[in-house]
Each structure stands twice: as structure tokens, then as C-alpha cells.
Image (tube, rainbow, N blue to C red):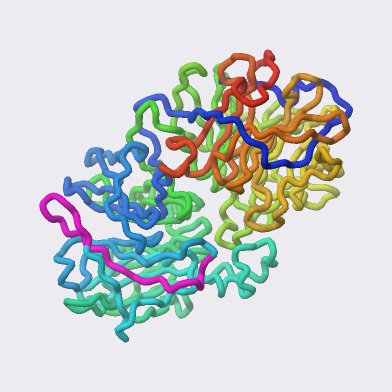
Amino acid sequence: MGYYRTMIANIKPIFAIALVAVVMDLQAQEIIPKPFVFGHNGDIPLAASVIGASDFLFMDWDGDGDNDMMTTSGGSVKLIENIGSKKKPRFNNVFIHNQVVLKDSRVGRFFSMILHSGVKAQQGFPSFIAFERHNQISDPGKKQLALHMFIPLRLQGKTEWKVMQAFGPDGKPVQNFLDCWVSPTIDIADLNGDGKDDLIVGSSHPRAAQPSLKFAAGYNNPQESWNPYASRLYIMYNRSTADSLIFDNPLLIEADGSPVSPFGFPYPIAFDMDKDGLTDLVVGQHKPGLMYFRNAGTKTQPKFTNAGLIADAHKKPISSILAIHPRFADLDGDGRQELLASTYFGCVDNILRFKPKNGGWEEQGPLMMASDKNTPLMPQGIGTIEPIDWDGDGDTDLVVGSEPAAPKVIINKGNNAHPVWEVPAPLKFTDGSKLEYYSIDYGLGSVWGPMEWYMERVLPRLADWDGDGIRDMLTGSMGLRQLFLKGRMIKGELRFEKPVVFKVEEKPLAAGQRVQPAVLDLNTDGHPDLIALDDQNILTCWPGKGTDELGQPQVFLGHDGKPLQIKTRILDIGHGRSSFTMTDWGLDGKPDLLIYYAFDRKRGGIFYYRASGKPMQFEKPVKFSNLLSFHNGGIALSDWDGDGYLDIFTGGDGGHLGRSAVPRGKLFLFSGKELPIPPAARKSGPMTVKK
């Protein structure tokens, strides 16, 4: 399928542009978007976020001898069955098999399997243990987070659950983690040799991280006021009796005399790294690099020392934001534990598998699940689409943005009439490494503070910005910036240089967060221009010069002649979060505007703004569709089916089953001729990255 050149090449010279004020109460016509599906029965990456997974572990739940995947999700534990062979693990398709084994609101986001609690009622059954959670990520301080063990009693083919609350040594319920993001992370190990499983608990403390307590508004607090190392780890020794689940008060875990202090948010896992019979700690954090703390103590008294970062097979640290949430399991039955790692708890997809090699860990790619031809395409995290003929074969491929900032390309090996999509493949930097970058390196971090400083949102727009005949990438960011990644053809494929921040008068452009820009030559000077939101959410054009230096901003106007402010929320979590594209929708010689307005459940959706006859002004908008995704799904145009009408491509977030407006979908297509105002019919040629 081809992405058609409607942005620059087919726009007639114009001398005035027009825009309009936002009117969000117009009724959208009921248009059913079509989800993109793989179109084949081959294996695809396991998409655990579809069932809302925020934590995962591996155990033989069904007793068939191999390790299944268990996840936590919305106050439940769900099973993703391993249906592969001993040598090749392969999991059930989560779109078809969504099996809840435990539904209980006391199950928080994170859990562990406990084998030896010391409580008689456990009867030797592998059980789950979890803290409760706050309702929202910004709720710390609102309630104590109780601790419970969930024991599966399998009777006559059915599983019933016995739930036991944990108590402290004073006989009161465990309630030591009031000041915690969401809920504590947790793992278990016998750390004092008494035969009972003790708890290893990770907690990220927002009040220590941000003394102003405005910990959900990072931009409104100077970065120097944040303490990104406010996470702590604790041991809670098991003092259970036959009748009561009891744990000691938390003891701070130190290494080399100082508290273990992961960045942003901790994921502690007990694992004997050096095979000396003592429990070491592997600790994930919200920045690339899995921390390793070696146990230099004894089986009855642990003593930890910092042993650096977990390394790959080449002795280099495993350094990717896609591998910060670790677990260990033997999935292929060879007796050796493997490292399984995903990104942060809001986006458990593409769980990377590492096997031991040369004293380190060699990446094997993501865990895979069974597919069928109707399984939706699932890019990492929150997807936005840029349709383009990537491989030059005449059909349309999809470059997809994501959170974290690790964009991928999905190659269409079929055709537009019968697409067959390959497994999403990472885009590359010019040196051949996977394209991945972080908000804190190119802007102001994140509205959420350090938890997201090493996260980032990439919302790609491909255009030949510098006029060298090669497509470049332009994108918004979490950090109130717009970024430019220069494209280069290397070994026959499009690769990109590291991001560069756009500037105005040599100062970084201040932009709305997580905004996908529009790119086209508005002033017909031969250079594409950048259209995005400024830091006050006003739609703005920055004239381009083919470099990272932009001209003075020009503000678009609404139908009332006032600056077109897309949102009124400034520098908070609802700020920015919109996508734009511009094209001559009606072929009247003037570029019109389409907006994907996100992060607003009541007023969000896709809107069409027709250019008026006045410079830099639009008429009142028409709502094309309601909100498909709460997060910014982006907006792009292409004549997918070759009928002469531009169609709308858009993406979305996890699309949890039962929650999405269109279940079973994450990347969508709206037929242009079915829109309330169809585009004028046109003939266009495909846009390709191949020369």
C-alpha cells in the first residue's frame, strides 16, 4: 500500500492559509474503523498489554511440564498458556485466550509466587502474594496498601482461592507502604535459611522524590527539585506460624554501606547470578541498565555489594528501556534459567528473551505467541502510523511510533488488497544499532517526573526536510520539544542519525508534549515547514530552512479570529497530546487541517478544519470520529484502497479487550469516502524511501 504524496508535491502554490477555533460539541457520524490485522498464521510477538498486564512471572500452572506466563491485570491474575515445545516456547494468542484464574481487587499491579510461606493452609500449593494498589498513579498517601497471599485450592477439577491477609509482628495488618507509587513491587527468597520465603520489596517514594508533593506535574517543578533516586528496597523476614501469615517490619537493603537506590521505579528480583548458592539481587529501574548486587554474606545473613550492570554476551551492559523489568525462568527445559525482560509496567509488550552465553546474556528476540490472519497488528506501547512504501515494492508499509521511543517498521509482504504483515522490525541508527532514545537527553523529561525521564514518545512523520532526496523523521516528544532525525540510505536501507532539537534563534523550540507534527511547504519557498503546538497549546507554524533552525513562529487563527488554542490545560498531564496533518482536502488550492485530539474522553476524536479565505485561519471544525484511544493515536493520510479518496490512518494505546471502542485493534483505517465530508477524488503516486 502506498503513502501518497498529498502533503507537499500535490499542494498547489498558495499565498494565504486559514484556520478555525475549536468547537468540540459537534456530533460525529458513526463510522466503523477497520483494524489492521496480520493476515497470516505465523507466530508474532506476545502482546501482553492487550490483557492489561502490568507484571508477569512464569510457572507451570496447568501441570503439563512447561512454564506458562501469569500476569496481573486490573485486580486479577491471568494465564497465558505455553503451547509450544520444550525447545521452543510459544504462547497462546491473547486476543483469543483471555483466561482469568483469579479475580480479586486486592491483587495489585505487582505480584510474586510464594512456595514456602510457613502457613499450614498453603498445603504446598504454589501461591501468589501481592500488595494492594492505589487507584491512580497519583494517589500515594490516600490508603495503606495491605498484603495478601492467594492460595489456589484445586478441588475436583476446579480452583477455589483461600485469601490470607499478612500481619506484622505487632499483630496489626502489614501497612508500611502508604507513600508509594501505585503499589510495591515484590519478589521472594529464603534470605536467612529458615526454610520460609522472605519478601524483597521495592517502593518508589513520591514524597521523597518531590518535596512539593506535586509529583504528577514534572514541568511545573524544576528538575533540580526532583530526587530520581528516591526508590528503596526492603527485606521483610517471614515470621509466619502455622495459622498466621506474619512478616517483620521492612529492613532497608543496603549495598556497600549505602541504600540501594534505583532510578525512578524499582523492580527487584532474587536470583543467584554467580551460582555460589547465595541469593543475589537483580534490580530493574526506569532507565536502561539492570543493576546487579552480589550477595557477599552467608545463607543466614545476606550482605550485598554493587557488582555493576547485567551484561550481554559481549560483556557490555544490556542498555535498553525495553529491558528494565526482569524475571528469570527456564522456558526451554535445558536446566538453565533465562532472563526475560520488558519495559515499564504500563506497557508489558515485546518481552525480550535472553539466554546465558559467555558469562552474559544473549538476546533471542521477543517471546512469541500463536497468530491467525485476524490477529491485530500490535506495535510496542502507544501506536501512531506513518504509511509509506518502505521497501519500494509498490505497496504500503507502516512505520509505527511508540512509547517508549523505539519505532518500528511493519513490512507488507502481500499487497493493499490482501496485506500480509511481517513481525515489526526496529528502525536503526546510522551505525546499525536499534533506534531508541530518551526524553531527558533532548528536552525537559516528562510531566510525570523521573519515572518517565528515560521513557519517550516517538510520533514519526517522514519527509525530506533538508532537500537531499532522502526521507527524514520529525517527531514530537515528552520533553516539550520537536525533534529532527536526519535520514541516510546505508546498505540499501533508510537509517537515521541521532535526534536533534529544533531551535528558534538558537534556543530550543518550546512545544506541546507528545505532539505529532504536520510537515509541508506552507509558504511555498521550497522548504517544508513545521506545524505543531507551542507550549501554550496554540497551533503554530515554524517556517523551515532545511536545517534544525526554524523561522519565527506564525500563529493560526480560529473562525473567530483568535489564536487557535487546541487545549486549555497547560504543562500538566493533559497538555499537548495531539496530532496534525494538513492537505488540500477539497482540492480548492488551500491546505486544510485534520487534528487527532486525544487525552479527553468527552471531547476527543478526529476533527476536520476547512481553510477559510483569510490568511492563517480555519472555519469551524467538523468531527469525523469519536475517540478511539485515550492516548494520542496520531493521524496520517493515504489512499489505501486506490479508489481515489484519501483514507485516515490512526493508532492507539493498549486497546484492552472489553475496553477499546474497537476491540481487537490498535492500528486503524477510516475509509475516506465514508467520512462526513469525503475528500475530493484525486490521482496520486506512492511515496517511497527507495530511490
Q: Is residue 284 left or right of residue 431?
A: left
Residue 261 seen anywhere in this rendered image of the structure = no
Residue stretch in magenta: 139-161
Residue 573: % across, % down: 63, 56
Residue 466: % across, % down: 76, 32
- Vertical order, 225 against 534 (above or below): below
Residue at the spot x=60%, y=46% of the render?
602
Specify the quadrant that holds the C terminus: top right
Residue at the spot x=38%, y=41% of the render?
46
Residue 92: % across, % down: 30, 39
The answer to whether residue 158 is magenta is: yes
Q: In terms of depth relative to the viewer, which is nearer, 285 or 22?
A: 22
The answer to whether residue 520 is magenta is: no
Residue 490: % across, % down: 60, 30
Q: How many marks?
A: 0
Q: Is residue 66 left or right of residue 638?
A: left
Q: Quadrant of residue 84?
A: top left
Specify the quadrant that holds the N terminus: top right
- Vertical order, 103 against 308 (above or below): above
Q: In terms of depth relative to the viewer, which is nearer, 353 or 624?
A: 624
Q: Quadrant of residue 332?
A: top left
- Vertical order, 231 against 59 (above or below): below
Q: Is residue 333 left or right of residue 328?
A: left
Which residue is most to the left?
A: 156
Residue at the spot x=22%, y=51% of the render?
61
Residue 450 seen anywhere in this rendered image of the structure = yes
Residue at the spot x=57%, y=71% of the render?
209
